[in-house]
Structures are given as structure tokens and as C-alpha cells.
Image (spheres, grey):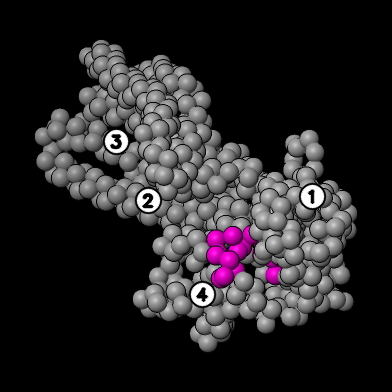
Amino acid sequence: MLTRLLITTLRPYRRLLAAVVLAQLVGTLASLYLPGLNADIVDKGIATGDTGYIMRIGGWMLAVTAVQIAGSIVAVYFGARAAMAAGRDLRASVFRRVGQFSGREVAQFGAPSLITRSTNDVQQVQMLIVMSCTMLVAAPIMCVGGIIMALRTDFGLSWLMLVSVPALVTGIGLVIRRMIPGFRLMQVRIDTVNQVLREQIAGIRVVRAFVREPYEVERFGDANYDLSMVALRVGRLMTLIFPIVMVVLNASSVAVLWFGAARVESGQIQIGALTAFLNYLLQILMSVMMATFTLIMVPRAAACAERITEVLDTESSVVPPAVPVTELTEHGTLELRGAEFQYPGAEEPVLRDLSFRAEAGQTTAIIGSTGAGKSTLLSLVPRLFDVTAGAVLVDGADVRELDMDLLWSKVGLVPQKPYLFSGTVASNLRYGNPDATDEDLWHFLDIAQARDFVAAMPGGLDAPVSQGGTNLSGGQRQRLAIARALVRSPEIYLFDDSFSALDLGTDARLRAALRTVTGEAAVVIVAQRVSTIVDADQIVVLDDGAIVGIGRHDELLDTCPTYVEIVESQLTAEAVA
């Protein structure tokens, strides 16, 4: 997964990576050249007392060092650019894919996990790219070059490399092998911490209302403890790497000096050459160590890449049509024909065999007990979910065959939980229509019964709105969400229990004002209160996912026992009639 993801992500930046490899090659070759120059100074300058030779070679070493530094700087610069660009593209890809998900896929992954995958997981892959460009690319060049130069310097001591390098690789490899499961588990623990924290922040009012702060603190503490234990276990393994590296490096240095001293004494090698060989061996081991430090990140990056790829490879269950319908024969109509919906893995459908038609200029109400599938039914219209059987038609065309932008332009949805974005009142209302004027906004605020409280806010339309609209009451958020849908001026209005936070007077005034702007549109209202839908042209009664009655209020009181039960649970049938 990691290799495939890196190849796909880094393909547009081949030139930058080529520049990194070239710069690392130049810098590494310069680094390999220095021990040989140092050996010449010792053997040909210091041993003979030739100061001029020492100065010339010393100056040459300074020039080579400057080339090495320049190569390293260029490699780090281009490597960082490639890594940051790849991280940006990867985050954008995850964001676009999540934006295409239906409610089914979002529920499958969960919001906390999707946030972690698009932030922390991408960051881990990005860090691996940075480390690879700055260290991993240079490591094989230095290792191979060091071996060649060491063999040229003294073949008799080369057997030490056959002991030192495998010992270092084996020791570090065993540690990394044990770290891989820990890195995978760490990402899962991060998901859990994010989930708990997100729930606590979103539900802080409920937590305080039920005085559950100690319980929530304990719950977060448990999630945090689980993450810290995994991180500590991985950290303890990681701490073994540096001692292993130092033991092998120091033991190798002692071995070179021990066996090299005998060869110097016998005249098989000079002191400068022995010093160069030692430097080459250390460079080889250092290259292995650099590669190892980078490879330490591979297990965690691989786990993150699997999670990112899982998101990118997941296709939305709501698929755009291959040949979308763009020409419609009707205006402002909604029809369900034998519609059925079943969640994946569920034993029974949530909705089954739903058939009714909502006409332009009419108000269709949907009522039923909690869990009857009312909100799910509305979600089928804008294709937040797709039916598993039957069809949903908008303006005479199956929504699965309609152009997605065309479908969404015809539907104005006010969800059960109205969500406002951080910004201003105006910016939230213009989500419905970016070209709406201030006069348009005030007009629709009037209809939504929101003018008074918006006018009273400092700044009016420019008054700040916090994320989620938390600086507003529930009723204010609902009215702004309704105004946002009105600004869109769609052909079909979907109100998902959007009047529940309003008092009866505001509810009645709002519904009366709606008739002035929805005369040519189909209005579908999901409601719990009978008083909200008593004047509807058509009431659809749901029970356990099926339609048990369709008609006007008076008709249903005579023909639908379920509707009568709902009415009597709120007030007497005579009072409503």
C-alpha cells in the first residue's frame, strides 16, 4: 500500500526527486572523497614534513567540503518541496474523496477516523518522504561508495565489513519488526482519543447538565492512557536502536585499530590509509544507521498509508450517472415508487415499498413515531443515500440518472440538526445562493421569522456566527437554516423536523409566510407535532418503515388508527379538528 501510494503521489514531482538524487550523489561522492585526501595528508605530508603539500591538499579538502554542503542544501530544499507538495495533494485527495461519500460511507469510517486519516496519517507519510529525500537517498550511495573505497584502500581488512554491517542490520531489524504492530495499534488509539474528545466537545452541554464531568474525564483518561501505553511500548523499543548502533560502531572502530595495527607494523598498510579505511567503515555503518532511522518510520507510515488508501479506494455508494439526464419534463414534483432502503448488514429494511407523489404548489407532510424512517426517507431525495429497491423521481426523472448538480439545484434541504458554518449571518445564508443581495437576505429572513433577532445582533447580516452556530439558540439556528434554504429558491423544499425548536406562534407565522414563496414548489415537511402539519395538502403516515395512511388530516382521523394514536398522544382529535 505504501509503495503504491508513494508512486502515485510523487509521480508529478519526478523532476524534483531527480534533482534530490543528483544533489545527494554529488554531496555523497564529495564526502567519500575526503577520507582519501586526509590519508594523503597523513602519509605524504605529515610523514615527510611537506608543509606545502599539506596546505594544497587542505585547501582542496575545503573546496570538496563546500561542494558536499551545497549538495546537501540543494537536496534538502528540493526534497522538502516535493514532500510538502505531495502532502498537500494527498490531503486534497482524501478531502475530495470524503466529500463524495454518502452518509453510508461516512458512518462506516466515522468522523473522528476520517479526520485522523486526513491529518495525522497524511503527516506521517509526508514525514517519511522528507526523511527519505534527506537521508534514505544518500544511504545506498554512501554504502556502496564506501565499500568500493574501503576495498581500494585495504582489501585485507574488508572482512570486518562482512561482520559489522550484517550485525547492525540484524540488530536493528529485529527491533523494527517488533515495532510494526505497535505503530498500527497507535493509529487506532489516536482515532479513539479523537472520537472521545470530539464527543465531549460536541456534547459539553449534555455532560454538564447530567453532571457527568468526572465520568467523561475518566473516559478520556482511559483512552489517553491506552494511547500512552502503546506509545511507551514503541518508544522503549526505539530506545534500543541507538545503543545497538553505538555498540556496533565502537566495536568496529576497535576491531579496525586492533587488526590494522598489525598490518601497519608489518608494512602492509600505512597509517593514513588505515585512518581512511576506518572512516570509510564508519561511513558505511552511518549510512546503514541513516537508512535505519528512516526505515523506523516506514512501519507507522505503512499503517497510515493503508488507512489513507482505504479511504481513497472506497467508492461512494452514490455513483454519478454515466449518461446524466439534463432535460426534465416536469417542474417541482417528487415521487416515490416502491422505494426501499436497507442499511448494509441490517436484517430488515428501514423503509419498504414507499409510494406517493408530491406536486408543485402542495405541502406534503410526513409523520410517524420515532425510528419510523422519516429522516431516512428525505435523505433519499438529494441522494445522501440511494434506494436499495424501487425509485425516487424528481421532476419525472430517477434521481440516480439525474445530473448531480442539477438534482441538488432543485432541492433545498433543511436538516434535522441545522448546522451553521463559522463566518457571518450573510455568509451562511449565501450558501444557498452566492449572488443573493442584502435585500434578498432580509426578505427571506422576514419569511423565516428571523429578521428581529438578526437585526438586534451587532453588525446585523455581518454579525459573527461561531462554528456550528453555537453562539445562537436552537430556534435561531433553525430559522437561519430555513432562510438559507429559501435563499436557494429550489423547486422542492425538504424540511426535516425543522420547526421543532420553534414555539407554536412562531411556527404558525413561519408556515403562513412560507406559502408566499413556495406556491410553485413542492414542500415536504417531516414533523413530530401534529399542529405543524394539520393544514397540509397531503399527510403520509409512516409506521415501522411502511406507509400506513395517506390523506388529509380529517380523512386520516377516520381511516388511519396510527395517525389517530399520534394525534391523541399530543391532544384530543376534537381539539385539532
Q: Are marks 2 and 4 in contact (CB under 8 Å)?
A: no
Residue 312: percent from left, percent from top: 63, 48
Residue 328: percent from left, percent from top: 84, 75
Where is mark 4, residue-wise? 450
Q: Tag 1 or tag 3, which sits nearer the N-term?
A: 3
Where is mark 3, residue-wise? 36
Residue 393 in view: no
Where is mark 1, residue-wise? 562
Magenta stretch in the rendered image: 493-507
Between circles 3 and 1, the one closer to the viewer is 1
Q: Tag 4 or tag 1, which sits nearer the N-term?
A: 4
Disc 1 is placed on an element classified as: helix
Instruction: Give the residue drawn at x 29%, y 29%.
Output: 279
Instruction: Give the residue drawn at x 15%, y 45%.
Output: 55
Mark 2 vs mark 4, CA separation in Å: 56 Å
Does the stretch in magenta take in 501? yes
Side (left or right) of 109 relative to 522: left
Q: Nearer the viewer, residue 293 or 221?
A: 221
